[in-house]
Amino acid sequence: MRYLIVSLLGLFVLPLMAQDIRPLKGFRPTEPYDNVAVIPVYSDGETSSFVIYIKQGVGLHYHAEHTEQIVVLGGKGVMTLGAETIPVRKGDFITIPRNVHHSVRVTSRKPLRVLSIQAPEFVGRDRIFLE
């Protein structure tokens, strides 16, 4: 199976209601973190979105109930999607269907910063690690 990564060339528009428009640069970790910092952006019962900072990587895992879409906001990495290994960088858009094993290893000095959108709503119980 092939996976599609689309470069957005730095353009990204969130279809939010006017009162929910906030700059993504404003979502930063508020406390020190060792490897991964997850900052909730939005959740409504149907979908959840997070800005995630990753210093080193995230081990191989999958979501049995969720599709995840990722926009790389900064940094660089190497992502495994199923049987493929693909470099990712700022501006890339990645769709990860449910049950697809995936991981990421950061290759830049700066943390990898991504917007993760998951549907249905992610409440922390559907991340099954394989490593």
Image (spheres, rainbow, N blue to C red):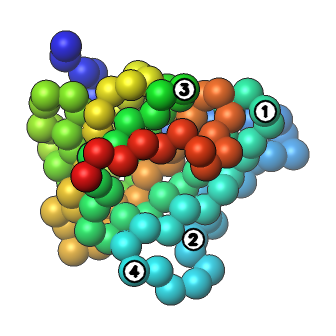
Disc on res. 28: 2
Residue toward you, 115 or 104: 104
Q: Nearer the viewer, mark 1 or mark 2?
A: 1
74 to the left or right of 116: left
Residue drawn at point x = 46 percent, y = 34 percent? 63
Identify residue for label 4.
34
Residue toward you, 126 or 114: 126
Disc on res. 65: 3
Amino acid on which disc 3 is placed: Glu
Identify residue for label 1.
45
Circle 2 SS class: loop
Residue drawn at point x = 32 percent, y = 71 percent? 55
Which quadrant of the figure has residue 14? Answer: top right
Q: Residues within 10 Å of mark 4 (few under 14, many from 20)?
A: few
Q: Are marks 3 and 2 in contact (CB under 8 Å)?
A: no
Amino acid on which disc 1 is placed: Gly
Question: Picture coordinates of residue 45 (x, y %)?
Answer: 78, 33
- Report the quarter where the N terminus lies: top left
Amino acid on which disc 2 is placed: Arg
Which of marks 4 and 3 precedes in the sequence?
Answer: 4
Q: Nearer the viewer, mark 3 or mark 2?
A: 3
- 125 versus 65 height, above or below: below
Q: Residues within 10 Å of mark 3 (few under 14, many from 20)?
A: some
Which quadrant of the figure has residue 74? Answer: bottom left
Residues under labels 3 and 2: Cα distance? 27 Å
Q: Nearer the viewer, mark 1 or mark 3?
A: 3
Which of marks 3 and 1 precedes in the sequence?
Answer: 1
Residues under labels 1 and 2: Cα distance? 24 Å
